Image (cartoon, rainbow, N blue to C red):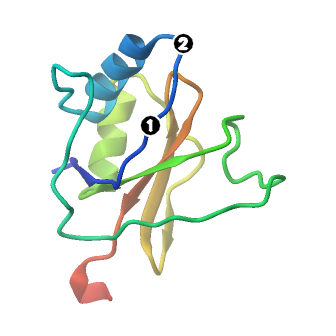
Amino acid sequence: MAKVLGIGGVFFKAADPQAVRDWYARVLGFDIQDWGGVIWPHPATGHGNWSVFAADSDYYAPSTAPFMVNYIFDDLEGVLAKARAAGAEPVGDVVDGEYGRFGWLMDPAGVKIELWEPPSPQAT
């Protein structure tokens, strides 16, 4: 189905907030509300995660931002296909692991975003 299922919350600054909102609506299908943001119900799958990386970690590369956002999706391949169709190229290869499938994009503010499809309940 290729839709975002949720996140706990992320707030950041951008030089052109409307361009960033427009990109997220166009590339990832975010339903931006009149007040300028999105609210999702708690996801039925996955979980929230908070983690601190070492200052010299290159996990966020090629972004130079000191943070990265992880969004839970129900269909990683579908969302990557939608992103490509909207002109956004993935960063690196899809990674499959015990915690699910992961892909990455760079948004127009230069923030690397992580796209996560948790494993199905049958796989855990």
- Asked if 25 appears above or below 40 in the picture, the reply is above
Residues 67 and 1: in front is 67
Other residues around mark 1 within 10 Å, as few (<14) / some (14–19) / many (≥20)? few
Label 1 to label 2: alpha-carbon separation: 14 Å
Residue drawn at x 27%, y 47% as measured from the top left: 78
- Reading the image, the residue beneath label 1 is 11
Apparent side of residue 43 relative to residue 49 in the rendered image (left or right): left
| Quarter-of-image position of residue 25 | top left
Label 2 element class? loop
Identity of the residue drawn at 52% across and 20% down: 14
**Residue at position x 42%, y 43% from top?**
10
Q: Is residue 47 above or below residue 10?
A: below
Q: In this image, 113 relative to 25: left or right? A: right
Nearer to me, 64 or 81: 64
Rendering coords of residue 26 (x, y %): 28, 23
Nearer to me, 92 or 36: 36
Indicate the amino acid at tag 1. Phe
Residue 116 image position (x, y, % from top left): 40, 59
Q: Amino acid at mark 2?
A: Ala
Q: Which mark is residue 66?
A: none
Q: Looking at the picture, how far across and down is residue 73, in whole percent?
A: 29, 55
Q: Which mark is residue 15?
A: 2
